[in-house]
Image: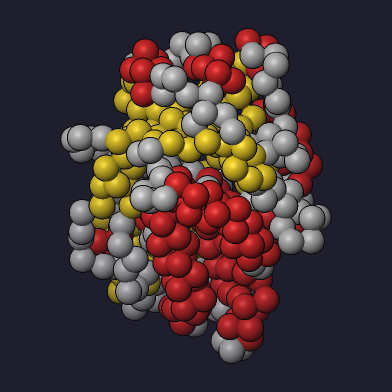
Amino acid sequence: MSSARPSVIIVGGGIGGLFAANALIAKGLNVTVYEQASQLGEIGAGVIVTPNSGRHLERLGLKPAVEKYGARFGGGSRYWRDDGSSIAPVQVTDSSGGTPVYGMHRADFVAFLSEKLPAGVVQTGHRCTGFTQEGDVARVTFANGATAQADVVVAADGIHSELRPFVYPPSQPVFSNSVAYRGLVPHEQVPQWPNDAWQMWLGTGKHFLVFPVRAGKLINFVGFVPANAEMRESWSAPGDPDALRAEFAGWDPKLQALLAKITHTFRSALYDREPIPTWTKGRLTLLGDAAHPMLPHLGQGANQSIEDGMALATILAHADRKSAPAALAAYEKLRRERVADVQRGARQNGMRYDSAYADIQQRDDEIKAHADFRKTLYDHDVVPGAERLAAELV
């Protein structure tokens, strides 16, 4: 069976693509990752690792790396009103209490995912420009003139995916009318700040999120504010720290102390897409933001891409070259409804965070009740469902 297993090309060397490569290789498949940048890395700051993806990282032997580079969130994690009064604690484990939530620097995440891969798996400097498939072969072309072929191609190349239009007609990303200011402050500059807590302040039309990364050595912040004009999604548009401070002037004095230490920030507009009815066409499928870009208000973008990768690897491990398209269809069947629910939930939670209510107490009551939703989200394990569908291929 191993000689007949499908070979896989992954386009995109971000968190989702690299995790999928690790998961597929762990199942014995031959994988090559093509990344357009000249070297791997993530521009940006923090991401959270929630239990619904953490259990898959553990399955691949990556729990020690998560514990080394991450910052585990503890019981001091809370939601606050903009004046600093407490709303509710934050759910920072699954319902069993056994699988925690971590803050992670994106660059650290990419580094340890790539370091686990065998030499030569990742090919940088390859910007995808085209795709064709005929019979049992799928081919990808690149701007540098190279071509590659495999039994399966996985597009993990983000919200502006070059390959997505080969699966579903082009559409414009949906602008959320919000902008995020992101950045990092060394913990040594704010030693009074807890380096084991996820905290969020909620106000009218805006909210501010703070959590530790890099084993608590850095404090990650994100300020979400209204926007009047669209700008292209980017991690690297410079932001003005003074403009950020002005947006949150008069909020909780604890928050002001952190804002005072911010010297650099990056501004990005927040986009998602409407859920699409298909992710797969023949031997090409989508993964992560290429399939289901979502707003960050549930902290699930990277986590859902990891779920995708684990599901894909579990199912493809039971396929051969001939049945690979059926395996991709099974992967889509398993994942599409769940991630559509998460996409919609992220939109709804953003409205909740920005206090889109006539009665602010309604918002606070929903925030308090939100822990039950988080438990359900975090308890999900994609593997049993993937194994059931995979068994049908045999």
What residue do we see at 34% from left, 62% from top?
A: 139
What residue do we see at 74% from left, 61% from top?
A: 95
Q: Position of residue 234 (x, y in %)?
A: 33, 34
Asked whether 119 or 225 is in front, the reply is 225
Q: Position of residue 205 (x, y in %)?
A: 35, 39
Left or right: 109 in relation to 350: right
What residue do we see at 58% from left, 68% from top?
A: 311
Q: Quadrant of the N terminus?
A: bottom right
How many callouts does the rendering have? 0
Within the image, what quadrant is residue 119 found in? top right
Left or right: 132 in relation to 213: left
Q: Is residue 335 visible?
A: yes
Asked whether 107 or 283 is in front, the reply is 107
Q: Position of residue 157 (x, y in %)?
A: 39, 50
Residue 244, compared with residue 314, is above or below; it is above
Q: Quadrant of the C terminus?
A: bottom right
Left or right: 247 in relation to 341: left
Left or right: 134 in relation to 245: left
Asked whether 202 or 283 is in front, the reply is 202
Within the image, what quadrant is residue 84 found in? top right
Within the image, what quadrant is residue 116 found in? top right
The colour scheme of the drawn protein is secondary structure
Q: Is residue 22 visible?
A: no
Q: Position of residue 246 (x, y in %)?
A: 36, 18
What residue do we see at 68% from left, 34% from top?
A: 197
